[in-house]
Amino acid sequence: MSLVKLNIKGISYSQTQNGAYALILNEVDGERKLPIVIGAFEAQSIAIALEKEIKPPRPLTHDLFKNFADRFDIVVKQVIIHKLVDGVFYSSIICERDKIEEIIDARTSDAIALALRFNAPIFTYKNILDKAGIYLSINPSENEKQNEDNDDILSTPETFGIEEDVVVPSDNYSGFSLKELYDKLEQAVQNEDYEKAAKIRDEISKKES
């Protein structure tokens, strides 16, 4: 299976679930976005890593891991989002020490927070992006300027305490037809409600599988 490189477009606050955030990943050589719902603590950690000027007075958990790894000559080479099951993304951290490579299972939000600190690339498999990726618009050229204006969707989280990746059920959309779901998906993306788009996308995947 071929790997697709991703970068981080930004983080937006969940409009429907308190304390949850949508991490938006963008394929490097394409237009698809991969929204992943994460907790507030992980969103804060990723936001701080993205904003290079922000230096917390004491190391956050992911900073501590980075310091620990540096001390023992462990390098994070890359992160791979390798599986999607029932709306939950699974990731692996590829590490190296003394030219020996190890693969460590991790939550996607933690893996990405660490990838930023090690300047490590983020990948997913093409079949996952085919299943879970969404387009910002049906005709991107018409909204090019609007998308450029909205590139900075990074929000600084103000709440903490969610330790697990948030899984948003898609049961609310089970009664809709595929055509209705695609219409709702397009509307959610146009409104930049990526968390809602992710829920609808998961329901579409269930119906098409």
Image (spheres, helix red, strand yellow):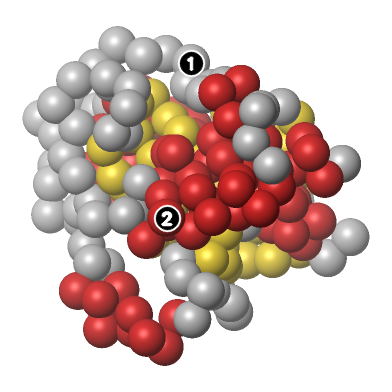
Relative to 154, residue 89 above or below: above
Q: Are marks 1 and 2 in contact (CB under 8 Å)?
A: no
User: Which residue does the image show at 74% across and 42% down from the upper left?
Assistant: 205
Residue 188 shows up from this direction: yes
User: Which residue does the image show at 45% across and 81% down from the upper left?
Assistant: 140
Report crowding for label 2: few under 14, some 14 to 19, many 20 or more residues within 10 A (C-alpha): some
The tag earlier along the polypeptide, 1 or 2, is 1
Where is residue 184? Give x, y as percent: 50, 49
User: Which residue does the image show at 46% across and 70% down from the upper left?
Assistant: 137
- Left or right of residue 45, residue 187 in this image: right
- Left or right of residue 41, residue 120 in this image: right
Relative to 89, residue 138 above or below: below
Q: Nearer the viewer, residue 26 or 56?
A: 26
Q: Nearer the viewer, residue 150 or 23?
A: 150
Task: Return the mark for residue 187.
Answer: 2
Report crowding for label 1: few under 14, some 14 to 19, many 20 or more residues within 10 A (C-alpha): few
Residue 55, quarter of picture: top left
- Left or right of residue 168, residue 188 in this image: left
Relative to 78, residue 209 above or below: above
Disc 1 from disc 2: Cα separation: 28 Å
Q: Secondary structure at mark 2?
A: helix
Where is residue 56? Give x, y as percent: 14, 34
Q: Amino acid at mark 1?
A: Glu
Residue receiving disc 1:
164
Q: Amino acid at mark 2?
A: Gln
Q: Secondary structure at mark 1?
A: loop
Residue 46, quarter of picture: top left
